[in-house]
Image: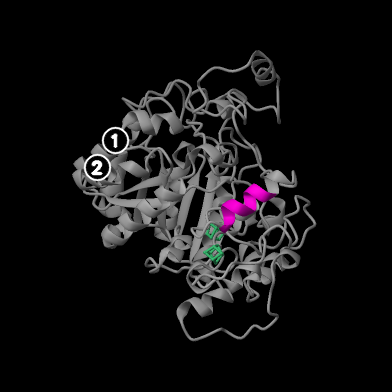
Amino acid sequence: MTIAPERPGTGAGPSTGPSTRIGQLLPTTGDRTPRGDRLVDQFELGLDAPICLTWELTYACNLECAHCLSSSGRRDPRELSTDQAKAVIDELQRMQVFYINIGGGEPTIRPDFWELLEYSIEHNVGVKFSTNGVRLSEERAAFLASPAMNGYVDIQISLDGATAEVNDYVRGPGSFDTAIRALENLQAAGFSDAKISVVCTRQNIGQLDEFKAIADKYGAMLRLTRLRPSGRGADVWDELHPLPEQQRELYDWLMANGENILTGDSFFHLAAFGESLPGLNLCGAGRVVCLIDPIGDVYACPFAIHDNFHAGNILTDGGFQQVWQKSELFQDLRAPQTGGACAKCSFFDACRGGCMAAKFFTGLPLDGPDPECVQGYGESALASMNAAGGRVIPESSQDHSKKNPTRNQPVMLQLGRRPDDLEASLQPRGMPVSACAESPLAGFDPGTGALGGGGGCASGACGC
Ligand code: SF4
Ligand code: SF4
């Protein structure tokens, strides 16, 4: 029998202030002895080096997906230089980080992307990179399949619909065709084991079998991940996040097909339906997971780009190792937690209260249930906070969305805008950017891979 947690909303709510210590928002035991001798008990206390390090190389992107977790679009002029990026790779090699997840923005837009990829592999740091496929031409696919890559590179092509209609609604016109063309090129080049990475939404849960068929067709593996309300995802979460009955559908599908499906440990909150899914089943933020953003800021998790989860900067705080091992934030996150209100739930051992970032960016307290708690406590917590008018949704600390459409009119909202919104969208916002940072693929034809300008962005105007 499930024991109801204490009413959510009675604990300390998340603060949007940068000075808030996460240790004040999480109930901890103060005891640093592992709970047991399972691997997960060790992981809870943190490791000397992260297992799952995501490094976003750039905020620039040719697309403007409605749910982008990092609110990407425009390049940030402060992004790490090639030499600085290589120094990070050197440090990761010294720390024996055995692979990195590279993302963005669209990482392949960086003109030094391929150089950094080779550098990383030469230094025994394997690379898994996520891309919308825009630069995976036949030539690049052949390079990635070549012995020079030594099998150390893994590629994830993002696809959020098994049909163009569903995918392009969220990711933008033409993005389905671009992704499929990349898969075709990889297959033709003999690259084995590409991944198709799907963010599960209300619109695509009914397409799980079709996604699997696409993966099989291209000799790829299917990877399903959870939509979090992070970045622009906060703007569209209410519309896109799966309904309760779809969560059940997803769980049942994963239980039936899970052995051949990767989930990136996304769905451990679904374990409260009964049996746990394979994987870590733990929020690894700051323990085994972290993010380096394009300007060298280190956050606890790729889905937690907010000052409250900012651990330091690799350029100003003594390097990545120093930040990972010494930051106050990560020390707080590695303290064993009691579970707060969720500790009374009979599913707590499996679900652990769900995803910290999902709670934070929906305005729920970190010591309460996940907003998509399958026992329904998250929904009722959101409803009661809404009714009381007390739900404050924190904003990400970075927003590199393109000027048009603006943050609140992402790609999927093409149904027409009110004139006042339109007027607002035409006002300049954010830092001034160069033309190529605003539109890094201006002049680029994804069909041919041809660029209109020099090595990187088509215009070459910013010298990147
Ligand atoms: S905050 Fe959420 S996405 Fe990040 S490590 Fe924890 S569970 Fe995973
Ligand atoms: S979030 Fe998980 S642990 Fe918390 S009440 Fe829901 S099922 Fe139980």
Is residue 100 among the parts visible in the rendering? yes
Quadrant position of the C terminus in the picture:
top right
- Residue at mark 1 to residue at mark 2: CA–CA distance: 9 Å
Name the quarter showing ligand 1: bottom right
> Is the residue marked by circle 2 packed among few (<14), some (14-19), or many (20+) residues within 10 Å?
some
Disc 2 secondary structure class: helix
Question: Which residues, given as a range, are shown in magenta?
Answer: 377-384
Disc 1 secondary structure class: helix
Is residue 392 among the parts visible in the rendering? no
Q: Residue furthest front?
A: 1
The location of residue 26, given as percent across then percent down, is 69, 67
428 vs 129, nearest the viewer: 428
> Is the residue marked by circle 1 packed among few (<14), some (14-19), or many (20+) residues within 10 Å?
many
Q: Is residue 22 left or right of residue 357?
A: right
Instruction: Please name the amino acid that badge 1 sits on.
Output: Ile
- What residue would you read off at disc 1? 180
- What residue would you read off at disc 2? 214
Instruction: Please name the amino acid that badge 2 sits on.
Output: Ile
* N-terminal-most mark, 1 or 2: 1
The location of residue 157, given as percent across then percent down, is 36, 43
Q: Main secondary structure of the magenta part?
A: helix
